[in-house]
Amino acid sequence: MNTIEACIFDLDGVIVDTAVYHYKAWKRLANELGFDFTEEDNEKLKGVSRMASLNLILGWGGVTKTDAEKEELATRKNDWYVDMINKMTPGEVLPGAKEFVELCKSDGIKTALGSASKNSMTILEKVDITHLFDVVIDGNKVSKAKPDPEVFLKGAEALGIEPQYCVVFEDAIAGIEAAKAGGMKAIGIGDPKVLHEADLVVSGLNEMTLDKL
Ligand code: G6P
Ligand code: MG
């Protein structure tokens, strides 16, 4: 019997592919500081908060900055990132994502967004899917980053559903760990070798059906 009552979705890499915009903006910042980093390094930034990402990148470049300088650098990167996401269109929703969230809703399953991004609302509005989520918990509403389960627990609480009846969809290892730490099921979006802690891994929401929940 299907006991799942809520699906909680990460945003970047699950619903939309904004990783490329994050990468472009961080790369531009690193280049201005006189170094570069690879796309492989960029993978380590998935699901990682803005300031934690900056700290990793500065470490790769061997650059030390004060807290005030870091604030300025993070703002500079975010301004470039916001310029890019402001140009996003509904065509940038990942294949099958909209359809699967709609399918959940039509089956009476509650839906939430659980993302570290403080830009979540802008992205949802630009790609015109804000209405698909009963609850949105984003980076403005949490104090502890994934793998801490705070973002997903807050989502479950706002929906009024116990964690054991929730499934989290995540493309980041830290996100799968967060779901598990919160006592939820986790479905990985991506490579099963990378996301081996997940209960199930699919390549995208276009592969999902309700009986896989
Ligand atoms: C998501 C992305 C990360 C990003 C983080 C914060 O988790 O996967 O790459 O750093 O959100 O995003 P923000 O839009 O608040 O800078
Ligand atoms: Mg993600």
Image (cartoon, rainbow, N blue to C red):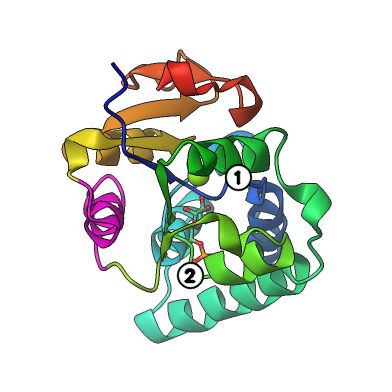
Q: Quadrant of residue 86?
A: bottom right
Percent x, y for residue 4? 31, 31
Estimate how packed mark 2 is, as few (under 14), some (14 to 19) or many (20 or more) residues with alpha carbons within 10 Å. Answer: some
What residue would you read off at disc 2? 118
68 up-or-down from 205: above or below: below
Indicate which label's residue lies in the foreground, 1 or 2: 1
Mark yes or no: residue 33 visible: no
Estimate how packed mark 1 is, as few (under 14), some (14 to 19) or many (20 or more) residues with alpha carbons within 10 Å. Answer: many
Q: Secondary structure at mark 2?
A: loop
Please report the residue visible at 27 percent of the width from the left and 44 percent of the height from the top. 147
Q: CA distance from mark 1 to mark 2?
A: 16 Å
Of the 4 image quadrants, the one containing the N terminus is top left
Do tag 1 and tag 2 residues touch (Cβ < 8 Å)?
A: no
Q: Quadrant of residue 32?
A: bottom right
- Residue 15: which numbered mark, if any? 1
Please report the residue visible at 54 percent of the width from the left and 65 percent of the height from the top. 120
Q: Secondary structure at mark 1?
A: loop
41 up-or-down from 30: above or below: above
* Nearer to the camera, 165 or 123: 165
Q: Amino acid at mark 2?
A: Lys
Please report the residue visible at 42 percent of the width from the left and 68 percent of the height from the top. 64
47 up-or-down from 183: above or below: below
Residue segment shown in magenta: 143-161
* Nearer to the camera, 133 or 173: 133
Left or right, residue 109 beside residue 142: right
Pick whichever of labels 1 and 2 is earlier in the sequence.
Answer: 1
Percent x, y for residue 168? 37, 37
Q: Amino acid at mark 1?
A: Ile
Left or right, residue 115 beside residue 86: left
Q: Is residue 190 magenta?
A: no
Please report the residue visible at 77 percent of the width from the left and 49 percent of the height from the top. 92
